[in-house]
Amino acid sequence: MRLRPLPSESKVLNQTHFAPDERLLLSRFWQSASGFWRGPRAWRAWLLVTALIATVFLQLLTQYALNYWNRDFFNAIGRKDAAALWIEALRFAPLAAASLMLTIFSVWARMTMQRSWREWLSNHLYDYWLQDDRHVRLRSVAADHQAPEFRIAEDARVATDLPIDLVLGLFSSLLNAVTFISILWSVGDSLAINVGGFALTIPGYLVIAVITYSFLLSASIFLIASHLTGVLEENKRAEAELRSAGTHLRESGGGTSLPEARYAIGAALKSVIAIWRIYCWQLMRMTVVTYSSLLITPVVGLLLCTPKYLMGTMTLGEVVQATAAFVVVQSAFGWFTDNYARLAEWTSSANRVASLLLALDQVDRPAPTTADEAIRDDAALIRWQRGQSRMPSPPNAQ
């Protein structure tokens, strides 16, 4: 005969669970979210992907042409050639128009894909949450699933908006880096330095300089904001608890005493403000690096080109061209620096959606009757989820 667990043991069972690691959470998120790219209607998503990739290539060609336009325009200024200046002014109009139209189309395609993906994932989450009364039975599951409605409404939005922005930005940055490094190498060429009678020639010195400069900026951001993902997750958790406290007060009507309800809301608000202060200090430190880079990078490019300009081996137009290419390459290499906060925000939202999915996965499992069974079951669940993340999930209707 099996003994029933004591009340104190039952309480422990309801609270005992393994917190999944971040790799498992992200795997679980993509297991569900990737269903948007499969199924009979996935061709629409892939058509938008193709259009966005083509737009990135066309924008690169336009930016490349504008870089050479800068060289020719400023060379005409250096020669004081009025006729050439008028020709360059006429050349600029179609380049600017093409760049504007491509940017507008890119915004439409990107936001259309974000809206479609969010709609698909939200419907998937709502269906999974409400099916078989899981939204009711979820309360008995010991897992991270607080405020599921907030996770579906807000975290699913962030988790589908940011990946498209980030992937497009990364793809564009890689193309820009490869393209404009060739300009830096050819225009900058090598730099000869005489130090104490010793001659030193640095080949491709502008390329070496921009790589070193970008690495230092990225390392600074990583050291300053290495805990930003955790801070953002705590911020979202605190905000969700504050909303939940207010919702509970409204729905309970007169069933809850006002002093107790006010104390609960006050405690939740205090937690929100405390996390906000930490988040604020993280962003302030990051801003020191990012904004300093924004101000300094063009000046660094100009200073690096100045010696060759003074020696007469680089024209004014080439100085402007190389400086513009230096800024583009640094921006490409600095993609991680510029997007670290957004990466952390996406990771925190994806983790929260995945935590809800993992909790819903547990709803249909039989409840353990002892603490040892709870531990074994949680460990088995984690192993099962890891196995599922390696397998293609079945096509979902879109």
Image (cartoon, rainbow, N blue to C red):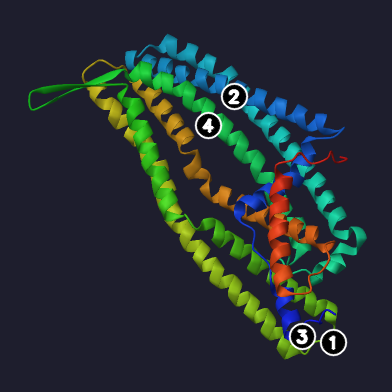
From this view, report whether residue 114 is shown above or below residue 260. Answer: above
From this view, report whether residue 382 is shown above or below residue 390. Answer: below
Residue contact between numbered discs 3 and 1, judged by CB atoms under 8 Å: no
- Of the two numbered discs 3 and 4 in the rendering, the one whose residue sits closer to the viewer: 3
Label 1 sits on a secondary structure element that is loop
Q: Residue at x 38, y 22 (%)?
A: 184
Closer to the N terminus: mark 1 or mark 2? Answer: 2
Which residue is labeled 3 in the image? 7
Res. 171 image quadrant: top right
Quarter the C terminus occupies: top right
Residue contact between numbered discs 3 and 4, judged by CB atoms under 8 Å: no
Mark 4 Cα-neighbour bin, 10 Å: few <14, some 14–19, many ≥20: many
What separation in Å lies between label 1 and label 4 (alpha carbons)?
57 Å
What separation in Å lies between label 1 and label 2 (alpha carbons)?
60 Å
Residue contact between numbered discs 2 and 4, judged by CB atoms under 8 Å: no
Which residue is labeled 1 in the image? 254
Q: Nearer the viewer, residue 130 or 378?
A: 378
- Amino acid type indicated by mark 1: Gly
- Of the two numbered discs 2 and 4 in the rendering, the one whose residue sits closer to the viewer: 4
- Of the two numbered discs 1 and 2 in the rendering, the one whose residue sits closer to the viewer: 1
Q: Where does residue 180 sit, x and y in percent of width and height? A: 45, 23
Q: Nearer the viewer, residue 25 or 217?
A: 25
Label 4 sits on a secondary structure element that is helix
Tell me, for residue 173, which label it has, or none: 4
Q: Nearer the viewer, residue 74 or 85?
A: 74
Closer to the N terminus: mark 3 or mark 1? Answer: 3
Q: Residue at x 28, y 19 (%)?
A: 190
Q: Is residue 187 left or right of residue 103?
A: left
Q: Is residue 374 left or right of residue 319?
A: right
Tell me, for residue 59, which label it has, or none: 2
- Amino acid type indicated by mark 3: Pro
Label 2 sits on a secondary structure element that is helix
